[in-house]
Image (tube, rainbow, N blue to C red):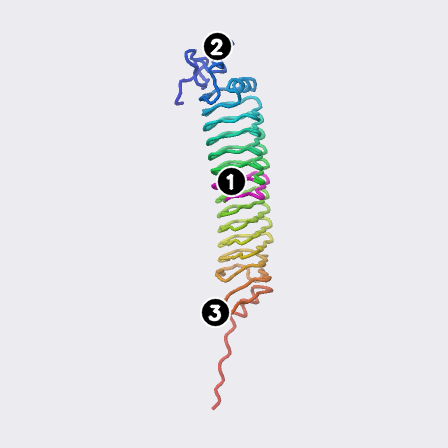
C-alpha cells in the first residue's frame, strides 16, 4: 500500500483520515460527521482501501453533492449496491483492484476524465448502459462474474479490456468507441452481443465460449481467436483480420466496402462470406473449411495456396481479374481450379 492505513485493526487497508488515524468506515459518529463535512464538490475524494457500505457511499456522495473531483478508490471494497445515477466525476477516477460485492450500476453517471477499473472484481451485475466517459476507460484484467451491460455507451477516447474475464452475458450494442476498443486475451463465458458498434475493435487471441455477434467500423481484428459457438461478424468500411481464427460453430462474415483476410482460419461449421459494395477477400491461404460460401466478393488479389477443401467452396457473383479480362464466377471452386489448370491445346502443324 502506498498510503497510511487504518489503525482500527491489522487487516484494515482503508486510508487513515487525519488526525484520527482511522479510515472513514471506522470513524466514530462525531468524527465521521466532521470528515464528511470536509468532502467538497470538485475536490479530491480519497477512499483507497476502504470498506464502503451502501449507507456510507450514499453519505459520501451527498457530501460531495454528487460532483466529486478526482476520485481515488483503488482497492476499495463495496459491500452494498453501488448506484451512481446523477453523479458526475469531474476528474479522473481510479478503481483499480476494487471489489464490488453487489450490484455495480454506473447508469446515469458521467465521467469528465479517464476511468481505470484495472483488476476490479464484480461479484454481481455490472451496468455502464448509456454512460459517457470523456476520457479513456480501462478494464484490463477485470473480472465480471455476472452480466455486464455496456449498451449505448460513449467512450470518447476508447476502451481497453485486455485479459479481462466476462463470465455472464455481455452486450456492447450501439456503443461508440472513439479511438477504438481492445479485448486482447479476454475471455467471454456466455454470449457476447457487440452489434451496431461504431469504432475499431480488436479481439486478438480472445476465447468465446459461446456465440459472439460482432461489428465494427474502421478496423476489426480477431486474429487467433477461438469461438466455441457461432461467430457472426458484420463490418462497414473496415479492414478485417481473421487470420488463424478457430470457430467450432457457424461462421458468418458480412462485408460492406471492406477487406478481409482469413489466412489459416479453421472453420469447422458452415461458413459464409458475403460482400456488399466494394468488398475484397485477400487470402484463403491454408484455410480449413469444409463448407464455405463466397458471394459478391472481389477475389482479384486473393491467395488460395494450401486451401484444404476446395471442393467445399461455393462461389456466387464473385469476380476475379485476369490480364485483360474480368470474370464472374459461379459454382464450385474446385471446378474453377480445374479450368485454370487445364493445359492449353497444342498447336497443330500441317506439313
| N-terminal-most mark, 1 or 3 | 1
Secondary element type, mark 1: loop
Identify residue for label 1. 177
Q: Residue 275 is drawn in which quadrant? A: bottom right
Name the mark on residue 31: 2
Marks 1/2: CA–CA distance: 44 Å
The span picked out in magenta is: 175-199
Residue 124, given in percent of the width and then of the height, sits at 58, 29
**Height in image: 205 above or below 110?**
below
| N-terminal-most mark, 1 or 2 | 2
Secondary element type, mark 3: loop
- Comparing 198 with 162, the one in front is 198
**Height in image: 92 above or below 219?**
above
Instruction: From the image, state whether disc 1 or disc 3 is nearer to you.
Output: 1
Secondary element type, mark 2: helix
- Comparing 270 with 153, the one in front is 153
Residue 68, given in percent of the width and then of the height, sits at 49, 23
Q: What secondary structure predominates along the stretch shown in magenta?
A: loop
Name the mark on residue 135: none
- Comparing 197 with 260, the one in front is 197
Residue 143, given in percent of the width and then of the height, sits at 52, 32
Identify residue for label 3. 323
In contact (CB < 8 Å): disc 1 and disc 2? no
Marks 2/3: CA–CA distance: 85 Å
Q: Would residue 194 be counted in the magenta stretch? A: yes
In contact (CB < 8 Å): disc 2 and disc 3? no
Amino acid at each position: 500500500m502506498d498510503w497510511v492505513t487504518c489503525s482500527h485493526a491489522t487487516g484494515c487497508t482503508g486510508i487513515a483520515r487525519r488526525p484520527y488515524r482511522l479510515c472513514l468506515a471506522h470513524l466514530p459518529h462525531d468524527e465521521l460527521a466532521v470528515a464528511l463535512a470536509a468532502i467538497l464538490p470538485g475536490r479530491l475524494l480519497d477512499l483507497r482501501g476502504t470498506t464502503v457500505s451502501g449507507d456510507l457511499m450514499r453519505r459520501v456522495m451527498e457530501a460531495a453533492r454528487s460532483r466529486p473531483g478526482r476520485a481515488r478508490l483503488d482497492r476499495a471494497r463495496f459491500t452494498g449496491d453501488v448506484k451512481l445515477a446523477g453523479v458526475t466525476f469531474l476528474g479522473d477516477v481510479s478503481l483499480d483492484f476494487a471489489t464490488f460485492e453487489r450490484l455495480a450500476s454506473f447508469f446515469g453517471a458521467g465521467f469528465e476524465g479517464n476511468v481505470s477499473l484495472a483488476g476490479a472484481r464484480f461479484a454481481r451485475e455490472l451496468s455502464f448502459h448509456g454512460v459517457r466517459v470523456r476520457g479513456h476507460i480501462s478494464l484490463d484484467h477485470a473480472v465480471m462474474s455476472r452480466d455486464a451491460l455496456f449498451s449505448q455507451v460513449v467512450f470518447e477516447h476508447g476502451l481497453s479490456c485486455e485479459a479481462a474475464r466476462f463470465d455472464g452475458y455481455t452486450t456492447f450494442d450501439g456503443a461508440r468507441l472513439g479511438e477504438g476498443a481492445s479485448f486482447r486475451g479476454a475471455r467471454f463465458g456466455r454470449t457476447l452481443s457487440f452489434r451496431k458498434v461504431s469504432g475499431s475493435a480488436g479481439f486478438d487471441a480472445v476465447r468465446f465460449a459461446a456465440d459472439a455477434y460482432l461489428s465494427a467500423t474502421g478496423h476489426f481484428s480477431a486474429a487467433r481467436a477461438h469461438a466455441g459457438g457461432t461467430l457472426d461478424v458484420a463490418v462497414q468500411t473496415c479492414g478485417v483480420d481473421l487470420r488463424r481464427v478457430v470457430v467450432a460453430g457457424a461462421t458468418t462474415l458480412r462485408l460492406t466496402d471492406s477487406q478481409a483476410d482469413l489466412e489459416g482460419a479453421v472453420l469447422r461449421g458452415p461458413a459464409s462470406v458475403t460482400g456488399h459494395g466494394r468488398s475484397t477477400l485477400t487470402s484463403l491461404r491454408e484455410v480449413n473449411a469444409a463448407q464455405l460460401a463466397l458471394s459478391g466478393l472481389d477475389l482479384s488479389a486473393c491467395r488460395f495456396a494450401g486451401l484444404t477443401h476446395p471442393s467445399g467452396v461455393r462461389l456466387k457473383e464473385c469476380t476475379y481479374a485476369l490480364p485483360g479480362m474480368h470474370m464472374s464466377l459461379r459454382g464450385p471452386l474446385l471446378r474453377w481450379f480445374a479450368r485454370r489448370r487445364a493445359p492449353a491445346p497444342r498447336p497443330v502443324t500441317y506439313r
